Image: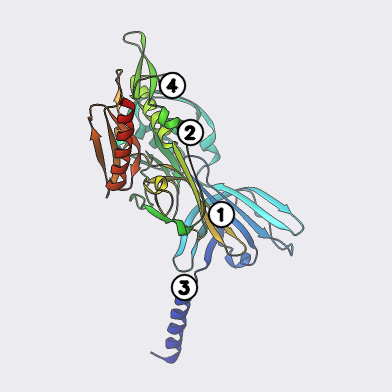
Amino acid sequence: MNIASTLTNIATDVEQGFNDSYPHVIYRLLVNGTDIGTMIQDRLMRMVITDNRGIETDSIEIELSDHDGLLDIPPKGAEIEAWIGWSNTGLVYKGKYLVKERGHQGAPDILTLRAEAADLKTAFKKKKERSFDKKTIADIIQTIALEHGLNPIVNETLGIIELPHLDQNESDANLITRIADEHDAIAMVKNGNLLFMPKGEGKTMSGNPLPEVIITRSDGDSHQYSDTDGADEVSGVTAYYYDNTHAKRKKVTVGMSDENTREIRNIQRDKQTAEHVAKAEFNKIKSKSATFSFTLAYGRPELIPESPLSFIGFKALIDDIVWLGTRVIHEYNESGGYTTKCEAEVYLPDADSLSELIDNERGGYTGILAYYKDGKKTATVTKGDQATPKRLTYLYKNRQTATVAVDREYKALQDVKD
């Protein structure tokens, strides 16, 4: 090895060591395929990437200094691709966007670009009128995906559900959102794919389950937790459907049938739809029983919606359970700072277990049942008679925290009976 090569290797090692000890933010931006990193290196004032769950449009906002008036304003519809990360861990791809809005203000002169995810084209939001007869969810998602040049990826369990009849008098975006809402699922357009999956079963680009992200109190800059007793007071959800065979209105109930049961007034098209709608509404209520948002002073580019989240160092009611990310905002500023804000909701246990379908009136609770995470599986802890157990809403992080919750709830149940 010659001296030049040796010096080069030493310089590389020194640089890598510096990056590991003092990482700095790195980013990459392409506009219509051209890398503009060098051009805007001293001009980028702010970049905000918002990653939403569901069909709600992802977006990027970029502010550039135009102090010398030399910046060209890109045309509407220009394509932006974005990456962000840290010098010691590398870049993470954040998507492709189309410029929808441009702004220029001064002094000092600033150029602002606002762009939305390129996957959600205008045609996806145009109203259509048609019907689907005896089609499975997979059939419908595939039809819509192919019409828009997308690759359909549908959860197998949801995909085989047949919808006897479905009328469309809305956009494709609204239709698949409606189907998702009825089945407690998520419909998303990401990186050329039309995804349809149960909440909490997000996948990586390679198709593997999203890894759990662990956040410690020292990682955070700020946080906000809130809960209400409204979700706990709702013991069940009732939905109605019309039975054509017997020419009468019938009902199905998810959860407990008592004075605290919430009713869905709209008559559903059939029993199957009523069951799915009641389950979805019940799970929606329970998932909103508590919310948590936090801002990380040191941005985490790998954080995306549907990521399972675990927290350490906060209050027990935050640390003891698993959370689910719903919206992630990555923000870079001109001082070199990069933060990530995440909004989260309660990660529910297996939905079918939590929202057991009940067709008849039942009495009070006889025991307690809680779910906890056991590796890649969901396990249970019980106490008391399990004939009619109260199923605790949360998915607990481990058996210990689930047991504490079961003991606490069982004591409260006994106190009420006494």
Q: Nearer the viewer, residue 17 or 198?
A: 17
Return the x and y of residue 235 as percentages of the image width and height.
38, 26
In the rendered image of this protein, does residue 4 appear above or below residue 250? below
In the image, what residue type sits under mark 4? Ile
Q: Quadrant of the N terminus?
A: bottom left
**Residue at figure coordinates x 47%, y 62% from the top left:** 91
Front of the two marks 1 and 3:
3
Instruction: Identify the amino acid type marked 3.
Output: Ser
SS state under label 3: helix
Residue drawn at (45%, 75%), measured in percent from left and top? 16
Q: What's the mark number on residue 21?
A: 3
Residue topped by disc 4: 264
Label 3, residues with CA under 10 Å away: few <14, some 14-19, many ≥20? few
In three-dimensional space, the C-alpha distance between marks 1 and 3, rounded to whole angstroms, equals 32 Å
Q: Residue at x 45, y 87 (%)?
A: 7
Mark 3 or 4 closer to N-term? 3
Whole-Å distance between the Cαs marked 2 and 1? 25 Å
